[in-house]
Structure formats: C-alpha cells, structure tokens
Image: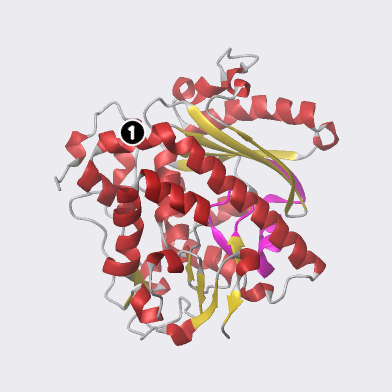
Amino acid sequence: MPQYTIGDIPDKVHTKQFLGLTPHLYRIFKEVGWDYYNKGMEKLNDAVNSLLSIRMKEGIEVSKKTVSGELKEPEKTLCYMLHPSIVPSRADLMVGTMKLLYGESVDVSFILIDDDSKEISFIVNSHLEDGIPVDFFIVERDDELLERRHMKLGYKLRDIPKKTKTLEKCGASVIEIMRDIRNERTPQWSNSTYLTAESWISCAINIVLECTGFQTHGLFWDGVNAKRRYKLKDDYCRFYPYPPSLNTMFMMQRPQYIARAAGLFNSHQMIIKGIHPTPLQWMKDNFVEVFEIGIRHQLEIEGLNLPVVNMNTRVNLDVEKGWDFDKGTKIKIEDLGIESSEDALKGVLLDVTHETPPDAKIDKNNIISKGWGLNTKFFK
C-alpha cells in the first residue's frame, strides 16, 4: 500500500495542523490518503447517529437503574459518559461525576464540525437534571434547524464555524441560537445553565478509535489544550463556556489531568472500550481499513499500553517522529484469552490501574467484567 505524507493534505484543510495529535487517524491516513477520509465524511451521518443514539439511550437506562438500585454490581458495569458520549465510565460513578462536572440543571449541545467544509455537521443536545439526561435530540447535516440565522450576526447556524474562525467564537455564537431553541422547546428549563462543546469531526473520530479509557482522557486533554499547550492556531475541541470544575482540571499537566479524570470516571481501572454491534458493523461494511488499521492494529498487533505508560506519554507534533512512550508491557487481546478484536470490543474492565508497574504481566486473571451496560458478564 502507498505511504502518504502530511504534504498530501491540501493546505486549505484547517485541521491539518492537528494531525500530530491524532495517532490513530494519522496511521490510517498514511495508508489510504486524504481522499479516503473525505469520502468517509460524506457517509458519516449514518454512523454518528447510530453511535450516539445507542450510547445516549443505553447510558440513560443504565444510570436510572443504578440510581434505583436495580442494576447488579454497578461498580463492575461500564457505560459511556452521558454527554458527550465519548468517555467510558463505571456505572456507579456516572451520575455523580456528571453532576459534579455540569451542575444540577443544564443543557449541553455537542457540536461536530466538518473538517473540509467547516460547517456544522451534527449537533447532539441533551438536558441533564441531577446528572441524568431527561431529554435529548439530534440535529443531522440536512436538518432545517441548521438554516436558522443568528439574530445579530445574520449567519446561518451551519455556517457559524467558518464565519467565526475559532472554536471559542463559534461556541459563543452557537449558544445564542441554541439557547433560544431550548427556551422554545422546553420553557420549563429556560433558567437552566447552557453549555456547548465543539469538536472537529477528525478529533472526535480519533477519540472514538482509541481503545483504552486512559488514553481517551489523554487525547481529550490534547484537543482542549491544542492552542495553550501545543501553540497551535486554535483548539481542536473545547467547551463554551467551560464548566468551572472542568476548566480547573484542564489547566493541570497532562499526567495529572488523566489521573484525575480516570479517578472520577472509572476509579483508575483500565478499560478496553466497547463499540456497539450496529456502528461496528457499519464501519466494517463501509470502511474496513479504518477498522483494520485504526482498531485491530491496537488490539492485536501493537498492543495496548498500561495506564502508567499512557499517563507519561510525550506527544510529538512532528508526525514523522511519532509519540514517545515509556517502555512497558503491551497488552494484546490474546494475553487476555480473548479470541478476536470483535469480542474485545464488547468492552473489558481490568483490575489494572495507574499504580500497576509498567512491566507487570497482565492476563485473563485481571479481567473483572466483559460487556457493556446491561449486557455485562462478571468474572470477579
């Protein structure tokens, strides 16, 4: 297969500058090129709708059963962060963490921006009460809601990212439209806090492709700190405005942030993230190279770093040199007695933490549970 270089990406692509922060996307790009990525953008709506809808509905169900006491062993059950649904969490920690981060009554609009057109491609809006979503809706690329104009600026909602130039300004303008929409749809929450979370699609995809919880936290920190810490022209993802607790956390150094976030969401335990069957099958049917190069490569060929190694990763924006990892054990699924990547992608919780030595031997005896949400099987 050909080896593409960063020079093959047109300079007009705004997110070209962030490629050094996307280890999985860059590995795919080197093999299949930028045209393949753009082809994926055109078909992405089907996958994103399926992925986020499933994660949101499952997270709500799991959280409600946890609060009611119906869920058996929530401390061994995994689900995704309720909003935006990108970070894996233990069920027993989910509601409390969401309430701590966002507050008691809040709307959050998760906005995905197309890398090429710079238009809003997708919005997932959720209203949370005491840490649990009680209402959510999804706006797709062709939704007429994106035609709504900003009252003062005159911009269409879909065009705001390319008109405002930065994610911070984008969030400030989008929130003025989305707050009005919230107040029209659900006037009972018109006094609730409103937040937006902006992300370029490539950033979100790279985080989705990451197979472990610890590294997911690291990639999230990289995106939020792209401008402040990596001196790039803008952030790769961000909140507007930042919830106070998250703003404090993102100001930490990378290792300290990962440790804090992993403690809040999964009590520092290592997670192999689950991908639900429908979006996984869509990926294999439409973009098998993404599955093979982006995911199977991690699970079967390269192996997964232990948490302590991921915490101490040294990010290198020079894509040719790559990232610098400390030496340590690489966990492959065969070490865990798992026969296929598809089986591993059902989700695995391990009794491995950031305090586990980097050269520790990890095997099937370290598995606490397999599966996701209500389909979890317990092993210890």
For label 1, count other residues whose C-alpha is less than 10 Å away and answer few (under 14), some (14-19) or many (20+): some
Q: Please identify the quadrant where the C terminus is shown.
A: bottom right
Q: Residue furthest left?
A: 2
Query: From the viewer's perspective, is 341 left or right of 72?
Result: left
* Residue 60 in sight in this render: yes
| Residue under the image location 51 percent in, 42 percent down | 48
Describe the element under mark 1 as helix, strand or loop: helix
Q: How is the image coloured?
A: secondary structure
The part of the image, by quadrant, that contains residue 137 is top right
Q: Is residue 87 magenta?
A: yes
Between 138 and 235, the one lying in front of the other is 138
Q: Is residue 380 magenta?
A: no
Q: Which residues are magenta?
A: 80-107
Between 251 and 346, the one lying in front of the other is 346
Query: From the viewer's perspective, is 334 left or right of 186?
Result: left
Vertical order, 185 against 4 (above or below): above
Type of the residue with mark 1: Asn
Residue under pointer 1: 38
